[in-house]
Image (cartoon, grey):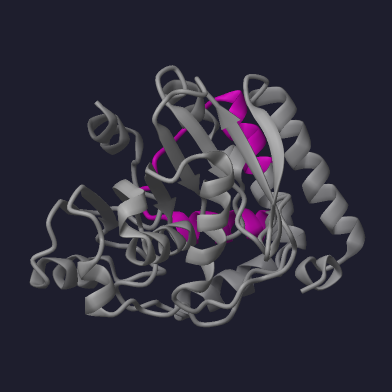
Amino acid sequence: MSQATQFRSAAGAREVHDSYRRLIKTHLPFAESHIISTSAGSTFVLSAGPVEGSPIILLAGSGSVAASWAPEMREFSRSYRVHAVDLPGESGLSTSERLALQPGTHAGWLHEVTSALGAERAVVVGVSLGAWVAMDYASSFPVNVQELALFSPSGIGARRVGPLLIAVLLSTLGDAGRRRALAYLLGPNAPAWSSPFHEDLGALALATFRHFKPRTDAIPTFSDEALRRLPQALTVVLGERDRMLDGPGAARRLQALQQPGRIECLAGRGHLVPQKPYLEHLLA
Protein backbone atom coordinates (compact mmCIF):
# COMPACT_ATOMS: atom_id res chain seq x y z
CA MET A 1 0.00 0.00 0.00
CA SER A 2 1.41 3.39 -0.95
CA GLN A 3 1.77 6.20 1.53
CA ALA A 4 -0.68 8.31 -0.50
CA THR A 5 -3.34 5.64 0.15
CA GLN A 6 -2.31 5.06 3.74
CA PHE A 7 -2.78 8.75 4.52
CA ARG A 8 -5.51 11.00 3.22
CA SER A 9 -2.92 13.19 1.49
CA ALA A 10 0.83 13.46 0.99
CA ALA A 11 0.76 16.74 2.92
CA GLY A 12 -0.99 15.00 5.81
CA ALA A 13 1.63 12.25 5.84
CA ARG A 14 4.38 14.88 6.04
CA GLU A 15 2.62 16.67 8.90
CA VAL A 16 2.29 13.47 10.93
CA HIS A 17 5.85 12.33 10.28
CA ASP A 18 7.32 15.78 10.98
CA SER A 19 5.42 15.86 14.28
CA TYR A 20 6.67 12.36 15.07
CA ARG A 21 10.29 13.30 14.40
CA ARG A 22 9.95 16.34 16.67
CA LEU A 23 8.54 14.10 19.41
CA ILE A 24 11.56 11.81 19.13
CA LYS A 25 14.04 14.70 19.12
CA THR A 26 12.42 16.35 22.14
CA HIS A 27 11.58 13.39 24.35
CA LEU A 28 13.91 10.57 23.30
CA PRO A 29 17.36 12.19 22.97
CA PHE A 30 18.79 9.11 24.72
CA ALA A 31 17.48 6.69 22.07
CA GLU A 32 19.12 5.47 18.89
CA SER A 33 17.06 5.55 15.68
CA HIS A 34 17.72 2.97 13.01
CA ILE A 35 16.17 1.35 9.96
CA ILE A 36 16.18 -2.42 9.56
CA SER A 37 15.69 -3.96 6.13
CA THR A 38 13.24 -6.88 5.99
CA SER A 39 11.54 -8.81 3.22
CA ALA A 40 8.42 -6.73 3.98
CA GLY A 41 10.29 -3.42 3.62
CA SER A 42 12.08 -1.06 5.96
CA THR A 43 11.34 -1.10 9.70
CA PHE A 44 11.96 1.87 12.01
CA VAL A 45 13.23 1.06 15.50
CA LEU A 46 14.08 3.16 18.56
CA SER A 47 16.64 1.50 20.85
CA ALA A 48 18.10 2.40 24.23
CA GLY A 49 20.00 0.77 27.05
CA PRO A 50 23.17 -1.27 27.40
CA VAL A 51 23.92 -3.38 24.33
CA GLU A 52 24.64 -6.38 26.56
CA GLY A 53 21.34 -5.97 28.45
CA SER A 54 18.50 -8.47 28.16
CA PRO A 55 16.22 -7.36 25.29
CA ILE A 56 12.69 -5.99 25.49
CA ILE A 57 10.54 -5.54 22.36
CA LEU A 58 7.74 -2.93 22.56
CA LEU A 59 4.88 -2.86 20.02
CA ALA A 60 2.29 -0.06 20.00
CA GLY A 61 -1.26 -0.27 18.71
CA SER A 62 -2.85 0.83 15.46
CA GLY A 63 -2.36 4.51 14.70
CA SER A 64 0.33 4.79 17.35
CA VAL A 65 4.11 4.88 17.14
CA ALA A 66 7.25 3.51 18.77
CA ALA A 67 7.89 6.82 20.53
CA SER A 68 4.68 6.37 22.55
CA TRP A 69 6.84 4.10 24.73
CA ALA A 70 9.22 6.94 25.71
CA PRO A 71 8.54 6.77 29.49
CA GLU A 72 8.98 2.98 29.54
CA MET A 73 12.11 3.23 27.42
CA ARG A 74 13.62 5.81 29.74
CA GLU A 75 12.92 3.70 32.84
CA PHE A 76 13.71 0.20 31.65
CA SER A 77 16.74 1.07 29.52
CA ARG A 78 18.70 1.58 32.73
CA SER A 79 19.04 -2.20 32.95
CA TYR A 80 17.62 -3.63 29.71
CA ARG A 81 18.23 -3.21 26.00
CA VAL A 82 14.86 -1.80 24.91
CA HIS A 83 13.63 -1.72 21.30
CA ALA A 84 10.38 0.05 20.33
CA VAL A 85 9.30 -0.93 16.83
CA ASP A 86 6.99 0.84 14.37
CA LEU A 87 4.56 -1.65 12.83
CA PRO A 88 4.50 -1.85 9.02
CA GLY A 89 1.63 -0.04 7.35
CA GLU A 90 0.88 2.14 10.36
CA SER A 91 1.41 5.86 10.94
CA GLY A 92 5.08 5.66 11.95
CA LEU A 93 8.28 5.55 9.95
CA SER A 94 8.32 1.89 8.91
CA THR A 95 7.31 0.80 5.42
CA SER A 96 3.87 1.94 4.33
CA GLU A 97 3.18 -1.57 3.03
CA ARG A 98 0.51 -3.31 5.08
CA LEU A 99 1.06 -6.98 5.75
CA ALA A 100 -1.88 -9.35 5.55
CA LEU A 101 -3.54 -9.98 8.89
CA GLN A 102 -2.94 -13.71 8.68
CA PRO A 103 -1.34 -15.75 11.46
CA GLY A 104 2.35 -16.14 10.73
CA THR A 105 2.78 -13.13 8.44
CA HIS A 106 3.60 -10.51 11.06
CA ALA A 107 5.44 -13.18 13.05
CA GLY A 108 7.82 -13.70 10.14
CA TRP A 109 8.40 -9.96 9.81
CA LEU A 110 9.09 -9.53 13.54
CA HIS A 111 11.40 -12.54 13.52
CA GLU A 112 13.52 -10.78 10.89
CA VAL A 113 13.56 -7.62 13.01
CA THR A 114 14.50 -9.33 16.26
CA SER A 115 17.19 -11.37 14.51
CA ALA A 116 18.73 -8.18 13.10
CA LEU A 117 18.63 -6.63 16.57
CA GLY A 118 20.19 -9.67 18.22
CA ALA A 119 17.05 -9.96 20.35
CA GLU A 120 15.99 -13.51 19.59
CA ARG A 121 15.22 -14.29 23.26
CA ALA A 122 13.26 -11.28 24.50
CA VAL A 123 10.52 -9.97 26.71
CA VAL A 124 7.81 -8.95 24.22
CA VAL A 125 5.18 -6.33 25.09
CA GLY A 126 2.25 -5.28 22.92
CA VAL A 127 -0.83 -3.06 23.06
CA SER A 128 -4.03 -3.69 21.07
CA LEU A 129 -2.95 -4.48 17.47
CA GLY A 130 0.65 -4.56 18.71
CA ALA A 131 -0.45 -7.24 21.18
CA TRP A 132 -1.95 -9.22 18.29
CA VAL A 133 1.42 -9.06 16.51
CA ALA A 134 3.17 -10.06 19.75
CA MET A 135 0.90 -13.10 20.09
CA ASP A 136 1.45 -14.05 16.46
CA TYR A 137 5.20 -13.94 17.06
CA ALA A 138 5.06 -15.79 20.38
CA SER A 139 2.85 -18.58 19.02
CA SER A 140 5.01 -18.95 15.90
CA PHE A 141 8.42 -18.67 17.61
CA PRO A 142 7.74 -19.65 21.24
CA VAL A 143 11.38 -20.34 22.08
CA ASN A 144 12.22 -16.73 21.16
CA VAL A 145 9.90 -15.18 23.75
CA GLN A 146 11.09 -15.19 27.33
CA GLU A 147 8.03 -13.38 28.69
CA LEU A 148 4.93 -11.93 27.04
CA ALA A 149 2.85 -8.96 28.22
CA LEU A 150 -0.38 -8.09 26.40
CA PHE A 151 -2.50 -5.01 27.08
CA SER A 152 -6.02 -4.94 25.58
CA PRO A 153 -4.99 -7.53 22.99
CA SER A 154 -6.92 -8.04 19.79
CA GLY A 155 -7.41 -11.61 18.63
CA ILE A 156 -8.75 -13.30 21.77
CA GLY A 157 -12.25 -11.92 22.37
CA ALA A 158 -14.81 -10.48 19.97
CA ARG A 159 -14.20 -7.13 18.30
CA ARG A 160 -16.89 -4.46 18.60
CA VAL A 161 -17.62 -2.47 15.43
CA GLY A 162 -20.38 -0.12 16.63
CA PRO A 163 -18.11 2.17 18.68
CA LEU A 164 -15.82 2.60 15.69
CA LEU A 165 -18.76 3.93 13.67
CA ILE A 166 -19.58 6.38 16.47
CA ALA A 167 -15.95 7.56 16.46
CA VAL A 168 -16.10 8.08 12.69
CA LEU A 169 -19.19 10.27 13.09
CA LEU A 170 -17.56 12.28 15.89
CA SER A 171 -14.44 12.80 13.79
CA THR A 172 -16.47 14.70 11.19
CA LEU A 173 -16.89 17.52 13.75
CA GLY A 174 -13.34 18.86 13.38
CA ASP A 175 -10.57 18.61 15.96
CA ALA A 176 -13.01 18.94 18.86
CA GLY A 177 -14.92 15.94 17.55
CA ARG A 178 -11.70 14.00 17.01
CA ARG A 179 -10.68 14.62 20.61
CA ARG A 180 -14.05 13.31 21.76
CA ALA A 181 -13.69 10.30 19.47
CA LEU A 182 -10.24 9.45 20.85
CA ALA A 183 -11.47 9.79 24.43
CA TYR A 184 -14.51 7.66 23.62
CA LEU A 185 -12.48 4.85 22.03
CA LEU A 186 -9.81 4.75 24.73
CA GLY A 187 -12.16 5.13 27.68
CA PRO A 188 -13.90 4.98 29.97
CA ASN A 189 -11.60 5.75 32.87
CA ALA A 190 -8.43 5.89 30.80
CA PRO A 191 -5.30 6.64 32.86
CA ALA A 192 -4.82 10.41 33.22
CA TRP A 193 -1.34 11.70 32.40
CA SER A 194 -0.17 15.28 32.63
CA SER A 195 3.31 15.94 31.29
CA PRO A 196 4.92 17.76 28.35
CA PHE A 197 5.52 14.38 26.71
CA HIS A 198 1.88 13.32 26.92
CA GLU A 199 0.75 16.73 25.66
CA ASP A 200 3.00 16.33 22.62
CA LEU A 201 1.92 12.71 22.15
CA GLY A 202 -1.71 13.85 22.28
CA ALA A 203 -1.03 16.44 19.58
CA LEU A 204 0.54 13.73 17.42
CA ALA A 205 -2.45 11.45 18.01
CA LEU A 206 -4.81 14.23 16.94
CA ALA A 207 -2.80 14.89 13.75
CA THR A 208 -2.76 11.15 13.06
CA PHE A 209 -6.53 10.91 13.52
CA ARG A 210 -6.91 13.83 11.12
CA HIS A 211 -4.76 12.43 8.30
CA PHE A 212 -4.27 8.68 8.71
CA LYS A 213 -6.54 5.94 7.39
CA PRO A 214 -6.56 3.07 9.90
CA ARG A 215 -6.94 -0.52 8.84
CA THR A 216 -10.52 -1.66 8.37
CA ASP A 217 -9.87 -5.33 7.57
CA ALA A 218 -10.94 -7.90 10.13
CA ILE A 219 -8.41 -8.88 12.77
CA PRO A 220 -8.34 -12.69 13.00
CA THR A 221 -9.07 -14.47 16.26
CA PHE A 222 -6.34 -16.87 17.35
CA SER A 223 -7.18 -20.55 17.63
CA ASP A 224 -7.08 -22.36 20.96
CA GLU A 225 -4.02 -24.21 19.71
CA ALA A 226 -2.17 -20.94 19.02
CA LEU A 227 -3.08 -19.54 22.45
CA ARG A 228 -1.81 -22.68 24.14
CA ARG A 229 1.59 -22.09 22.54
CA LEU A 230 2.01 -18.77 24.35
CA PRO A 231 4.71 -18.78 27.04
CA GLN A 232 3.87 -19.63 30.64
CA ALA A 233 5.43 -16.32 31.67
CA LEU A 234 2.35 -14.46 30.44
CA THR A 235 0.64 -11.24 31.55
CA VAL A 236 -2.69 -10.22 29.99
CA VAL A 237 -4.49 -7.05 31.09
CA LEU A 238 -7.96 -6.23 29.76
CA GLY A 239 -10.60 -3.59 30.39
CA GLU A 240 -14.03 -4.68 31.63
CA ARG A 241 -15.66 -1.77 29.75
CA ASP A 242 -13.47 -1.80 26.65
CA ARG A 243 -15.59 -0.31 23.85
CA MET A 244 -13.56 -1.91 21.06
CA LEU A 245 -12.94 -5.41 22.41
CA ASP A 246 -14.81 -7.88 24.60
CA GLY A 247 -12.41 -7.80 27.54
CA PRO A 248 -14.44 -10.03 29.88
CA GLY A 249 -14.99 -12.55 27.08
CA ALA A 250 -11.27 -12.64 26.31
CA ALA A 251 -10.43 -13.21 29.98
CA ARG A 252 -12.99 -16.02 30.25
CA ARG A 253 -11.58 -17.69 27.15
CA LEU A 254 -8.02 -17.66 28.48
CA GLN A 255 -9.18 -18.95 31.84
CA ALA A 256 -11.20 -21.74 30.18
CA LEU A 257 -8.02 -22.79 28.37
CA GLN A 258 -6.32 -22.88 31.79
CA GLN A 259 -3.76 -20.50 30.38
CA PRO A 260 -0.92 -20.03 32.88
CA GLY A 261 0.22 -16.59 33.91
CA ARG A 262 -1.45 -13.45 35.16
CA ILE A 263 -4.79 -12.64 33.50
CA GLU A 264 -6.70 -9.61 34.77
CA CYS A 265 -9.84 -7.86 33.56
CA LEU A 266 -9.92 -4.49 35.30
CA ALA A 267 -13.30 -3.32 36.58
CA GLY A 268 -14.47 -0.04 35.09
CA ARG A 269 -11.54 0.27 32.68
CA GLY A 270 -11.78 0.79 28.94
CA HIS A 271 -9.35 0.06 26.11
CA LEU A 272 -6.46 2.06 27.55
CA VAL A 273 -5.42 0.16 30.67
CA PRO A 274 -2.55 0.86 33.08
CA GLN A 275 0.71 -0.72 31.98
CA LYS A 276 3.51 0.52 34.23
CA PRO A 277 2.71 -1.48 37.41
CA TYR A 278 2.44 -4.71 35.44
CA LEU A 279 5.68 -4.09 33.55
CA GLU A 280 7.50 -3.18 36.76
CA HIS A 281 6.32 -6.44 38.33
CA LEU A 282 7.21 -8.42 35.22
CA LEU A 283 10.71 -6.98 35.00
CA ALA A 284 11.51 -6.89 38.72
For the stretch drawn in magenta, the main secondary structure is helix
Q: Is residue 150 visible?
A: no
Position of residue 80 in the picture relative to residue 147 (left or right): right
The span shown in magenta is 176-203
The residue nearer to you, when weighing 35 against 121, is: 121
**Residue 131, x across and y down, in percent:** 41, 58
Within the image, what quadrant is residue 240 found in?
bottom left
The residue nearer to you, when weighing 104 against 58, is: 104
**Residue 252, x across and y down, in percent:** 14, 70
Residue 215 falls within the magenta-colored stretch: no
Position of residue 151 in the picture relative to residue 7 (left or right): left
Q: Is residue 109 above or below residue 34?
A: below
Q: Is residue 170 visible?
A: yes
Within the image, what quadrant is residue 211 found in?
bottom right
Position of the C terminus, as image quadrant, is: top left
The residue nearer to you, when weighing 272 against 28, is: 28
Q: Residue at position x 39%, y 40% from top? A: 191
- Toward the right, the furthest residue is 11
Q: Residue at position x 50%, y 29% from top? A: 73
The residue nearer to you, when weighing 66 against 57, is: 57
Q: Is residue 48 above or below residue 36?
A: above
**Residue 25, x across and y down, in percent:** 74, 26
Q: Residue at position x 64%, y 69% from top? A: 214
Position of residue 127 in the picture relative to residue 115 (left or right): left
